[in-house]
Amino acid sequence: MGSLINMGSVDRILRLIVGVLLVLFALYGPADIAWKWVGWIGVVPIVTAIIGWCPAYTLFGLRTKKSA
């Protein structure tokens, strides 16, 4: 799977932080906000950070991981 990884360490850490914050917002944010469900989108950056592969990067030919 090493050749499929297209995300660098900083990218992965930032995605993980943003993803966790979004999920925490979905779980513990103010109950009176109608669009609180948007926080569940945070699962996507968490998963991509864990696996190190971003499908959008592949689609656009991007990568933040330095070549070995």
Image (cartoon, rainbow, N blue to C red):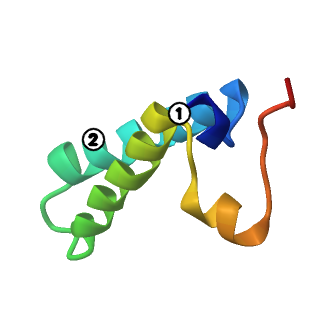
Kindly identify the amino acid type of the residue bearing the numbered disc 1. Met
Label 1 belongs to which residue?
A: 1
| Mark 2 or mark 1, whichever is nearer to me | 1
Q: Please, is residue 64 above or below residue 41 in the view? A: above
Q: Residue furthest bottom?
A: 34
Q: Residue at x 68, y 43 (%)?
A: 6
As helix, strand or loop, the secondary structure at mark 2 comes to: helix
Q: Residue at x 68, y 25 (%)?
A: 9
Front in this rendered view, residue 1 or 31: 1
Q: Residue at x 67, y 61 (%)?
A: 58
Q: Residue furthest right?
A: 67
Question: For mark 2, does the 10 Å Cα neighbourhood hold few (<14), some (14 to 19), or many (20 or more) residues?
Answer: some
Label 2 belongs to which residue?
A: 24
Q: Given contact means CB atoms under 8 Å apart, are the residues at marks 2 and 1 in contact?
A: no
* Count of numbered labels shown in the rendering: 2
Question: For mark 1, does the 10 Å Cα neighbourhood hold few (<14), some (14 to 19), or many (20 or more) residues?
Answer: few
Please indicate whether residue 2 sits to the left or right of residue 60 in the image. left
Please indicate whether residue 1 sits to the left or right of residue 24 in the image. right
In the figure, residue 39 lies in which quadrant?
A: bottom left
Kindly identify the amino acid type of the residue bearing the numbered disc 2. Leu
Residue 53 spot, x, y in % from top left: 56, 45
- Residue 40's label in the rendered image is none
Please indicate whether residue 61 sits to the left or right of residue 51 in the image. right
Q: Residue at x 32, y 50 (%)?
A: 43
Residue 34 spot, x, y in % from top left: 20, 76
Q: Please, is residue 43 above or below residue 5 in the view? A: below
Residue 37 spot, x, y in % from top left: 22, 67
Front in this rendered view, residue 9 or 37: 9
Query: Disc 2 to disc 1, how far (Cα)?
Result: 30 Å
* Circle nearer the N terminus (2, 1): 1
